[in-house]
Amino acid sequence: MSDLTVWRDGNGESIACVEKLRVLRENEAELRQAMQDAFEDAILMGVAPDEMRAHLMEMVSKLSGPGA
């Protein structure tokens, strides 16, 4: 799935740098796996799936940029 992602910069231009795309793909794969593991752990411990999804989305909404 990450190979199909079109990453854009602040001006809406596609990121074309091969090295940047490699790092973005690797980060996405690692994050996807960590989120899946946390999601499965929560479900196994009795957390409702929709509750965990909402919590993960809230965490993402609170991310800040570098230096913030």
Image (cartoon, grey):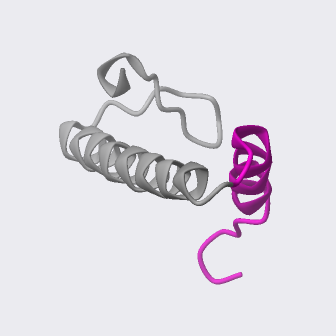
Rendered residue at 48%/48% (across/down): 40
Residue 38 inside the magenta-drawn segment? no
Give whichever of 18, 49 is nearer the camera.
49
Looking at the rendered structure, the number of numbered marks drawn on it comes to: 0
Q: Position of residue 14 (x, y in %)?
A: 47, 26
The span shown in magenta is 47-68
Which corner quadrant of the image does residue 12 belong to?
A: top right
In the image, taking residue 66 as reference, residue 56 lies left or right, namely right
Q: Position of residue 45 (x, y in %)?
A: 58, 60
In the image, taking residue 64 as reference, residue 5 lies left or right, namely left
Position of 67 relative to 26 (above/below):
below
In the image, taking residue 57 as reference, residue 16 lies left or right, namely left
Rendered residue at 53%/52% (across/down): 44
Position of 32 relative to 16 (above/below):
below
The extreme bottom residue here reads: 67
Q: Quadrant of the N terminus?
A: top left
Give whichever of 30, 51 is nearer the camera.
51
Q: Position of residue 28 (x, y in %)?
A: 38, 44
The extreme top residue here reads: 4
Residue 67 inside the magenta-drawn segment? yes
Give whichever of 34, 6 is nearer the camera.
34
Q: Position of residue 51 (x, y in %)?
A: 79, 48
Rendered residue at 34%/45% (across/down): 24
Q: Quadrant of the C terminus?
A: bottom right
Position of 65 relative to 8 (above/below):
below
Give whichever of 36, 59 is nearer the camera.
36
Which corner quadrant of the image does residue 15 belong to?
A: top left
